[in-house]
Image: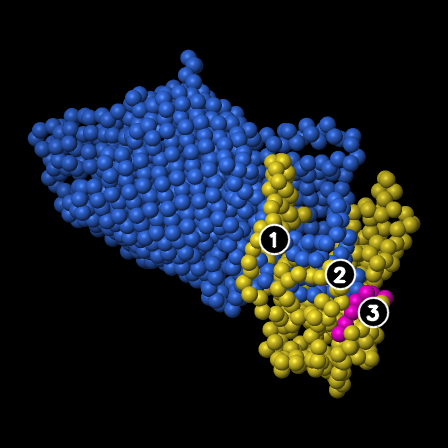
Amino acid sequence: MSRLYSFLFLIAFLSVGFASSAQNRISISGIVRDGSSGETLIGASVGILETGAGTITNEYGFFTINTEKKPDSITVEVSYIGYLPTTRRISADKDVKLDLDLSNNEQLLEEVVITGNTVREAVQSTQMSVENISMLEAKVLPAFFGEVDIIKTLQLKPGISSGSEGSSGLFVRGGSNDQNLIVLDEALVYNANHLFGLFSVFNSDAIKDVKIYKGGFPAQYSGRLSSVLDVRLKEGNNQKFTGSGGIGLISSRLTLEGPIQKGKSSFIVSGRRTYIDLITNQINKANEDNPDYNTIPGYNFYDLNTKVNFKLGEKDVLYLSGYFGRDVFGFNSDLFNFDFNWGNTTGTARWNHIYNSRWFSNTTLTFSDYQYNISNSITGFKFSVGSNIKDVNLKHDIYFSPNPNHEIKAGISATHHRFVVGRLKAGSDDGLVSFSAGQDLTAVEYGAYISDDWQISPALKAHVGMRLSGFTSDGATYLSPEPRLALRYLLTEKLAIKASYARMSQFVHLVSNSAISLPTDVWYPSTANVKPQTSDQLALGWSWELGKDFVFTNEYYYKWLGNQIDFKDHAQLFANNNLEGEFTFGDGFAYGTELSIEKNFGKLTGWIGYTLALIKRGNFADIMGGRYFSPRHDRRHDVSVVAMYAVNRWLTVTATWVYGSGDLTWLPGGRGLFQDIPGGTSTPVFPIYGDRNTFRVPDYHRMDVGIVIKFFPKWGENDLTISVYNVYDRRNAYFLYLEPQYSQDFGDEGPPPGAVPSGIAAKQVSLFPILPSFTWNFKF
Amino acid sequence: MNIKYIAASLLIILISLSACNLEKQIEIVLPEYESQPVLECYLEPGKAFRLLLSKSNSYFDPIPSDDLLPYLESLLISNADVRIRFGDEEVVLNNQVLVDFETGKFYNYSSAEIVPENFSDNFELEIILPDGKLITAITRILPIVPIDSISIEKNAENKARCLVYIKDNPNEVNYYRRMLHNGSIVDSFPEQDFVTDDKLIENNIFVFGTGYNYEPGDTIFNTIFHIDASYSRFLTSIQNSISSNGNPFAQPGVILTNLSGNANAIGIFTGLSYDRVMSVIP
């Protein structure tokens, strides 16, 4: 703890030092909001015309600008894409608190405005390796089964891939799917998927802002190696009651929001539910008298997002938000009663306090819970298994702007983790037979950081940060210093070169050896035997503003991965009291380059992205004798083309095209005779698997198109969104399998047991052919 | 019900919903494959010493449809020096093809010597291949874990299920292979065949059950093999390798063997001890 106190003392010391040097300056601070809804705007540009000083609003809509004290008044200009710029004359002889409301720009209704950051900001920011998407962008792009999914939109960005067809997985710059820090209103989301990874848990109607960091991580983030996905919920309209929703092929959504006390407090409630089970229930009911009919299991998922906020005064705002989502699978018959459900619960209580025009603080208490439960009963016997991870986190962040050249952030954080790993109970009703398994583990994760956005000269700007992360579990304590550095140098006003370095540590690990995310995958903490995973990422790049509409970005990265966790061959990861015995430890590296050109304004918007990458893992004592191998998601080339064309106010046409090198797969190289003991299963041969992932499946490519037709009735607006997934019906490989071939045709019954094949053929299975879908959306 | 099979079932539903042909045959070229010796040797008390020593081949090698015998012969490894030692004795297994017509199994190395009853010490296998490379292995024949009781229960439709109970020794980690046959041991494929262990058991009683699948007059055979950890790992790796084909959620792996030496051989050398009870559904 003494290190923590030293760290806090350093923050206080720096604060006093900067404050004392700011006697002849004033600060202008406040919050920028959407004038019609009261929603705070993240990333709005705020500047002073006379001095050129400027900044952007932070994730809470707050800004602060330092400028010289003047006897005359000065002009503050605020701009945000999609809104009319606003200027305000204010006196400049003392600190000013200035909240600003922006109005929608009606002239831009005919355009698809795709990002909150201006082209200029993308070039001039020290932050590199970051991608923003707006909800408008996500909503107009073609959607898989008509379900708008922010993670699938992010997968169209360079350096981010899905892992497999239709999946909402995130594989960022060579990282695994579990190496992404996913936070919803600052609460950690452990499993961001529904339906075995096909859809994400994020309901786009409730989301205000999405940002993903692929590198150059700001110091307030830690805990995962490869990316940070920061999702912010809307706060709710504090001016008037509104609603929105949609009816799609597989789900419907409804969002209601409005003021609790006009201008001071508001609420938002947003829900989504699928109805596949309602259809299958009717089919089952219609066939209940058919003895040959096999009942279709019931499945549905649902989400509920809620948020309220209260303005407690001029300087304080309290936010309370929550998420609850479940997937529910059930199969009941005369023999089985099988129920399986899983999902996340998160809660956030956040208090924003403005001390004065230079100091802003954010205190957050979050709760995260992920669990799955399986129960099954067969006459006289019961079986249940489940896992659970429960976090409570408290953190405090301060934002301090002592002068125009420094913006300081600092904070402390502590999380209590509780893990219930693979809790199994099985046995007979009479208690004669009983099985059990499972581990209960607890851990504490903590950290403190300080960072400074430092304008060293007009051309050179730096983000300098230091984080100390720690973790205590099972009697082991790990401390990890994590330096962060980002530099931007302006060669011209429109051309910047950038560099960044970030070290990250990961103390909780997903136990999964499957290609996709499964709900039964469990999280396991670092212990005395399981050391934290680490990454060190170095990135170099340049951004070039081309005209007023385009920005070109090119980045190169190299990532070292330490203490990587994999699993021994045939590891028993389910109901195992000694999971650590199945782990094997190694390292890895990834490097590559990403290019993108984006057009953010006008009737035609979109981007073209290209990634060239290589990923390796190795030095695992139990895998291939320690030799290096490529993981399945080692995709060499990846191209995405995204275009949105606003024909007029009523019609928008969109298209995306993606191309990627085929994923790697592990196929057997040989086969051996296996006759087994008398009475055994007696498969005549068994496959022999050698080195991992040596075969690449055929290249992947796909085009999706969409049309959004808008209507403007008196009560509000609505639209019909039509999407066609895989428009040219490309049969992309989801997986390969090897099938014995017989010289004789055995018909539908297939070969009899023991039949000797004449050869073996490779078959490719595709998941989705051309898939049209439509959604009707409304807003009032 | 395994989660990976639930996921695979949902995948099949999704594929079938699309009502399109989503499968196609493709040409793939696998890397050059280097053949390995493959060994199966099961020591059963009261039976002769015998084993099958073959070699693996490339996964896509064609299999002749008409005359299978020369093809099988080409997979056998001949002229190896094969010895099994136990106690002070050494048994030399001769290179001759032997077919057990009762079980349908065949072996290419055997001896007239009989595996002794009640020998609880090590058996040591040593094979010198024609190229001089060595295969070695050690195993024991574990004591039989007897079937404690069998319960036949019937439902309202007069269909029966069978529950088999065994008592487990709580002082050691035990592994079992459970088989269930309906009708015959050798003429029918097992309705259940899996390996398990006693690591999760709480009160030393194991139960193996069935669904209400049986009609009066059915003859069922319950067999409990008491196996060692290496045989359990071998069977698990064989089963996982087979079931990984066609299941995108499964992870294959290398074959886990208890064979050592410089021949890079895979396979199993183990003892067999089991209890088997035949029941006729009343």
Q: Which kind of residue does numbered mark 2 sit on?
A: Asp
User: What hue does chain B carry in this figure?
Assistant: yellow
Q: Chain of mark 3?
A: B
1 and 2 marks in contact (CB < 8 Å): no
The residues colored magenta run B102-108
Residue at position x 24%, y 40% from top? A545
Is residue B106 located in the magenta-colored stretch of the structure? yes
Question: Which residue was labeled with disc 3?
Answer: B100
Residue at position x 62%, y 71% from top? B36
Observer-side mark, 3 or 1, equals 1
Q: Chain of mark 1?
A: A
Above or below: residue A597 compared with residue B210: above
Seen as rendered, the residue at the extreme front is B66
Q: Secondary structure at mark 3?
A: strand
Q: Which kind of residue does numbered mark 3 sit on?
A: Asp
Is A652 in front, or is A443? A652
Kindly identify which numbered label has been placed on residue A762: 1
Q: Which kind of residue does numbered mark 1 sit on?
A: Ala
Which quarter shows the N terminus of chain A? Answer: bottom left
Crowding near the residue tagged with mark 3, few <14, some 14–19, many ≥20 C-alpha atoms within 10 Å: few
